[in-house]
Structures are given as C-alpha cells and as structure tokens.
Amino acid sequence: MIDVFSETIELTDEERTSIENAAAEALRSEGCAGDLTILIDTPERIRSLNRDFRHVDAVTDVLTFPAWEGEISLCADGYLGDIMICYERAEEQAIAYGHSLNRELSFLAVHGVLHLLGYDHMTEADERVMREKQTAILNSIGVTR
C-alpha cells in the first residue's frame, strides 16, 4: 500500500494519482513489494526535519526515512519507510526544468522510493545508476520531459 497525504497542501486527484503510480512503478521495476507513506509538506517542515535528521539546515526537495537500519531488507511487517516531498520546491523545479508539476512530483516519488530501496547518489557511478533507473521508470509509465 502506498499512502499519499498532506496535512498542509491541498493535492489534486491528478497529483495524488501521479505520485502513487510513480512510486508503485518504482517498486515494481525493482521487483519489490511493501508499504510506504509519502507526505507532501511545506518548506518549513522539510527544513526542520532535514536539520534534525541530516544536520543540514536547508530546504530540500525530498527526504527519505527508511524503516530499515544497517543492512537493507524488507522489514518484518512489510513497511519500507516514509518519503517527504516539498511541494513548493517541486513547483519551483518544475518551472526551472520546463516540465509539469506532475512530472516533478512523479520524479521525486521515484527518487524517494529508490532511496528507500538502498540506492544513493554519493558517487558519480551511483548517481549515474540512479539517474538511469529514474528515467527508465518514468518512461515506462509515460512520464517524460
């Protein structure tokens, strides 16, 4: 189950569906199943959590909180973790990259799911792998630039 919600942002049905479909496709493409929560929130809340958990006092577009610790594996109850997306940052990035807000929200959902599954982009090689996976997943559901 993928639960998309917001306590502060009024998501359209289309936005919610785009996020859910992208996250589900990311899981499917990796041969994974499990539950996750995607919270759409404000820059202030994202900044606060980024500061508290990553020690980076700045707004970011997406944060992930895997349910696993140490070695990556599906938790016993099937819960993969939480993803937080900054709606305002998604709006800004959609404009900057010249594509739709739904495309940006979908991209951030895929990016977050890949992080929950253990992918990262700390090295150039890892970033390339993650970028290729993101593009393939989005293309497979018809979400292109």
Image: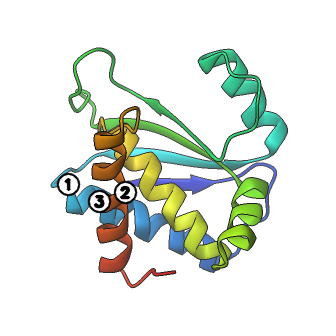
- Residue sitting nearer the eye, 23 or 133: 133
Identify the image quadrant of the N terminus: bottom left
Q: Position of residue 81 (x, y in %)?
A: 42, 35
Q: Depth-wise, is mark 2 or mark 1 nearer the camera?
A: 2
Q: Position of residue 38 (x, y in %)?
A: 54, 49
Q: Which residue is mark 3?
A: 133
- Residue 131 disc label: 2
Q: Give the mark nearest the N terminus, 2 or 1.
A: 1
Q: Position of residue 2 (x, y in %)?
A: 43, 55
Label pair 2/1, CB-CB below 8 angstroms: no
Label pair 3/2, CB-CB below 8 angstroms: yes
- Residue sitting nearer the eye, 93 or 65: 93
Q: Depth-wise, is mark 3 or mark 1 nearer the camera?
A: 3
Amino acid type, residue under disc 3 in the picture? Lys
Q: Residues within 10 Å of mark 3 (few under 14, many from 20)?
A: some
**Residue beneath the point at 36% across and 68% down:** 135
Q: Secondary structure at mark 1?
A: loop
- Residue sitting nearer the eye, 95 or 42: 95
Q: Which residue is mark 1?
A: 30
The furthest residue to the left: 31
**Residue beneath the point at 20% across and 50% down:** 32
Q: Secondary structure at mark 3?
A: helix
Amino acid type, residue under disc 2 in the picture? Arg
Label pair 3/1, CB-CB below 8 angstroms: no
Q: Residues within 10 Å of mark 2 (few under 14, many from 20)?
A: some
> Is residue 19 positioned above or below 118 on the image?
below
